[in-house]
Image (tube, rainbow, N blue to C red):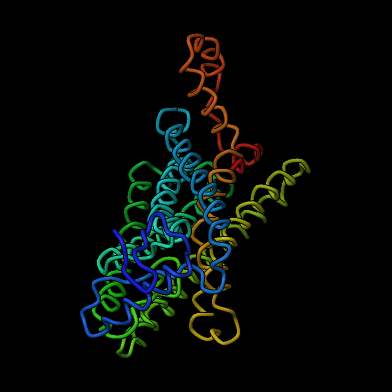
Amino acid sequence: MGVYGEKGTIDFYGFINRKEVSSMMLRLLSNHTSLPPATFFLMGIPGLEETHLWLAALLSAMYTMVLVGNSLIMTVIWVDPALHEPMYYFICVLAGVDIIMATSVVPKMLSVFWSGNGIIGFTACFTQMYIFHTATMVESGLLLAMAFDRYVAICKPLHYNTILTPQKILGINVAIVVRGTIGLIPLSWMVSHLPYCGSHAVPHSYCEHMAVASLACADHTLSNLYTLIGSSAVVGLDVTFIMTSYSLILQAVFNLSSKSARHKALSTCGSHVGVMTLFYIPGLISVYVDRWGQDMVPVHTQVLLADFYLIIPPTLNPLIYGLRSKKIWQGVWNTMATSFPCHHCVNSTKERRVKQEFVMGDISSTCEI
């Protein structure tokens, strides 16, 4: 498939000059502004075209880590009965959401960075937008649920099994998913029904809401306000409850007499706060910069911030929420060991493992994750 221009035919997957292809595609799109917007053209990172190949290599490595790490976490939790606990159920769902969130944007981003093929259909663009926005809202809810799980485990250990029953865990997960899927329907409807009669060139590497809505030839203030108010309300409420949970956890931790237990709890909870910071801060900055700071922050900085906001948390979550857990490490080892003929050598270790009780005196088990 080729494009005919001043320099002849150019194959999108074997082109010589990426800038020529990009500029040619933009000219072709601009020549059809009177037609219905069947396609958009993703520009990648405007101003940093020379770095697209390096970014593609980095993004490929991170995406591989997302797929391998989160798939391993999900498999281990699924097959190891010792990990069938509320805390690990939340981690399993979080791993699945991370894969969905990254997969919704990264393959197309790699296509843009590797080959310059930024063409994306109208339906595909808004489907992508809906999926990754829904995934981010679901992940925010899961972070809140995990903070609540730790609060109950540490501050109300004797009631842990009665408060977080399997039925309640299922209900919490369903409520989180329903909140995300329903909450994004109005935004998707508003943006997809805007008239796009001008340029179809999206100054972004994926179909980010603000970047796409800004191409509309009608007023898109309502969708922008919905994004601003909705994201602020959801994140504000979730972060408020998360910080409240960890404040109560820290109060309980500082009442412990063991210095080693306090140090371990602070280290673990600090890791959680770090992941939440990586998830929430870039997203909020991206929304507010798109709304008020476009003249102060370069476009390529805005795009980079939005890109890594969607890929860094899914890359790091398996390391911080999964592989830091001794029980998950043991589950990984047991799962891998069973694939060898001598897997019975590790069975005695698995049989001797006793399920930990959530008691205030044993902070190593209650604040392990």
- Quarter occupied by residue 41: bottom left
Percent across and percent down for residue 231 are: 44, 73
Q: Residue at x 72, y 52 (%)?
A: 254
Residue at the extreme left of the image, as rendered: 36
In percent of width and height, residue 30 lies at 33, 81
Quadrant (top left/top right/bottom left/bottom right) for the C terminus: top right
Pick the residue in front: 311 or 197.
197
Nearer to me, 64 or 225: 64
Q: Residue furthest right?
A: 259
Up/down of 22 relative to 107, above or below: below
Q: Identify the residue at image location x=63%, y=41%.
A: 360
Residues 184 and 31: in front is 31
Identify the residue at horizontal 37%, vertical 62% (top origin).
10
Left/right placement of residue 71 relative to residue 154 reads: left
**Rendered location of residue 347, percent (x, y):** 51, 14
**In which quadrant is the N terminus drawn?**
bottom left
Q: Quadrant of residue 357?
A: top right
Is the residue 181 above or below the residue 192 in the image?
above
Residue 142 drawn above or below residue 123: above
